[in-house]
Image (tube, helix red, strand yellow):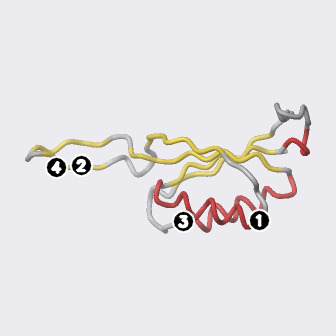
Amino acid sequence: MKMITAVIKPFKLDDVREAISEIGVQGMTMTEVKGFGRQRGHTELYRGAEYVVDFLPKVKLEVAVDENLVDQVVEAISKSASTGKIGDGKIFITPVEQVVRIRTGETGPEAL
């Protein structure tokens, strides 16, 4: 099992959710986060004063999947979250040792 963590632009959330649902992924966790990378933020004007926005709003998705779905999920996220512009985000893949479904006590891939 693997945990796929993706940091994407907020307006791409629905596109990504639809794309991974089509593959058969049944759930994900979404967190509103702020951050920056090469994009470095930008300046904005508020009541005539210019100020720097260092941390940009992003969405962090976490999806636990069986290893045979990893490539499909990563491809779906990459395609659906891409705008072709700087700041599209990142995808991280990490191993998951164990999963337990609290309601039933199921473990392993059955708990996903």
- Which is in the foreground here, disc 1 or disc 3? 1
First in residue order: circle 1 vs circle 3? 1
Q: Residue at x 76, y 45 (%)?
A: 64
| Picture quadrant of residue 53 | top left
Could you tell me if the residues under marks 2 and 4 are in contact, i.e. CB atoms within 8 Å? yes
Question: Which numbered marker is on residue 43?
Answer: 2
Residue under pointer 4: 45
Residue under pointer 1: 23
The reply to whether residue 57 is visible in this rendering is yes
The reply to whether residue 97 is visible in this rendering is no
- Give the CA separation, mark 1 to mark 4: 42 Å
Query: How many residues crowd mark 3 within 10 Å: few (<14), some (14–19), many (20+)?
Result: some
* Side of 108 relative to 57 (left or right): right
**Up/down of 11 relative to 107, above or below:** below
**Up/down of 8 relative to 36, above or below:** below
**Amino acid type at image mark 4:** Leu
- Which is in the foreground here, disc 1 or disc 2? 1
Q: Residue at x 80, y 40 (%)?
A: 95
Could you tell me if the residues under marks 1 and 4 are in contact, i.e. CB atoms within 8 Å? no
